[in-house]
Amino acid sequence: RGLISIGDCLGSLDFTRVRIGIGRPSRGCDVVEWVLSVPGEDELLALEAACSRAADAVEQIASRGIASVMSEFNARSAPGGPR
């Protein structure tokens, strides 16, 4: 319940979020188990790249504002991208 906890601490749910996509589990896989599982080596590399991109987005939002940054960073990655 991460967002709810953040909202409780801030006193509002009105804050900017930078989300990192993690893809989807294979058919029949339990979503919670998949999300909480340890990623493989190739997935770790994709996650590191996604975290780096998210950090870049945060820096740009801080300096330029969210409206001018959203379209630049909201492009979806190719299938099989970060988990």
Image (cartoon, rainbow, N blue to C red):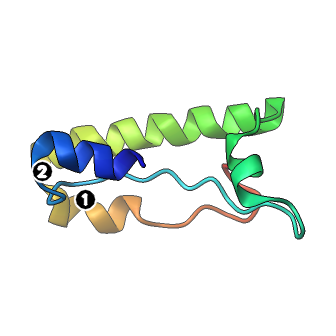
Q: Amino acid at mark 2?
A: Arg
Spot occupied by residue 8 in the image (x, y as percentages of width and height) = 19, 46
Q: Is residue 40 above or below residue 61?
A: above
Please determine whether, in this image, residue 5 is positioned above or below residue 13.
above
Residue at image x 81%, y 29%?
41
Q: Is residue 51 above or below residue 76?
A: above
Viewed as shown, does residue 13 lie left or right of 17?
A: left
Quickly name the residue at label 2: 64
User: Which residue lies at the image location 68% right of the left edge and 59% below the top edge?
Assistant: 23
Q: Residue at x 45, y 42 (%)?
A: 53
In the displayed image of the protein, which residue is found farthest to the right? Answer: 28
Q: Foreground: 4 or 79? A: 4
Looking at the image, do the residues carrying marks 2 and 1 touch, with CB atoms under 8 Å apart?
yes
Of residues 37 and 11, the one nearer the viewer is 11
Q: How far is mark 2 from mark 1, CA to CA?
A: 7 Å
Task: Tell me where residue 5 sits by quadrant.
Answer: top left
Residue 74, image x, y percentages: 41, 65
For residue 34, which numbered disc appears in the image?
none
Q: Is residue 39 left or right of residue 53?
A: right
Residue for badge 1? 69
Q: Say which quarter of the image contains residue 73.
A: bottom left
The residue shown at (88%, 70%) is 27
Counting from the top left corner in percent of width and height, residue 71 is at 33, 68
Q: Secondary structure at mark 2?
A: helix
Q: Dot 1, how many residues are within 10 Å of its Cα: few (below 14), some (14-19), or many (20+)? A: some
Asked where in the image residue 48 lies, by quadrant, the reply is top right
**Residue 79 placed where, x, y %?**
73, 65
Classed neighbour count for the residue bearing mark 2: other residues with Cα under 10 Å, few (<14), some (14–19), many (≥20): few
Disc with the residue nearer the chain's start (2 vs 1): 2
**68 or 58, nearer to the observer:** 58
Mark 1: amino acid: Val
Element marked by disc 1? helix
